[in-house]
Amino acid sequence: MTMTSATASSHHDWESDLEHYRSRAVHVLDTHLPAATGCTECGDPWPCARACTAELVLEL
């Protein structure tokens, strides 16, 4: 696939998007914590899906 002039002229700030996702992931990991009964935030079994997803986002 080659870039056309129309594609090249439309710039998307991917770094800004990634920084937003990283910031949100850190917030999720700060609030979704393990406890004896599961996640302290959502109550799902630990590790909850939100914490797992946040970990994956931080690997980007």
Image: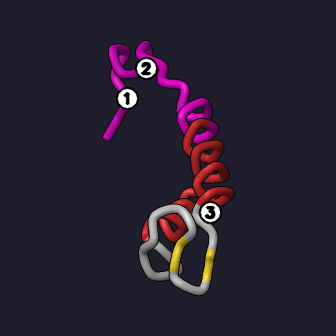
| Residue under the image location 36 percent in, 21 percent down | 7
> Does 53 sit above or below residue 21?
below
Residue farthest toward the bottom in the current orientation of the protein: 36
- Foreground tag (3 vs 2): 3
Mark 1 residue type = Met
The residue closer to the viewer here, 8 or 57, is 57
Could you say whether the residue bearing mark 1 is in a helix, strand or loop?
A: loop
In the picture as drawn, the residue positioned furthest to the front comes out as: 37
Circle 2 Cα neighbour tier, 10 Å, few/some/many (<14 / 14–19 / ≥20): few
Q: Amino acid at mark 3?
A: Glu
Q: How is the image coloured?
A: secondary structure
Residue 8 is labelled as 2
- Which label belongs to residue 59? 3
Residue 50: where, in percent of width, then height?
47, 63
Q: Report the span colored magenta.
A: 1-19
Q: Are marks 2 and 1 in contact (CB under 8 Å)?
A: yes
The answer to whether 9 appears left or right of 34 in the picture is left
**Local secondary structure at mark 3:** loop
Query: At 62% from the left edge and 62% from the top edge, which residue is drawn?
Result: 59
Instruction: Let me know if residue 50 is in the magenta part.
Output: no
Q: Position of residue 33 (x, y in %)?
A: 63, 69
Question: Height in image: 6 above or below 12?
Answer: above
Label number found at residue 40: none
Callout 2 amino acid: Ala
Could you tell me which quadrant the C terminus lies in? bottom right
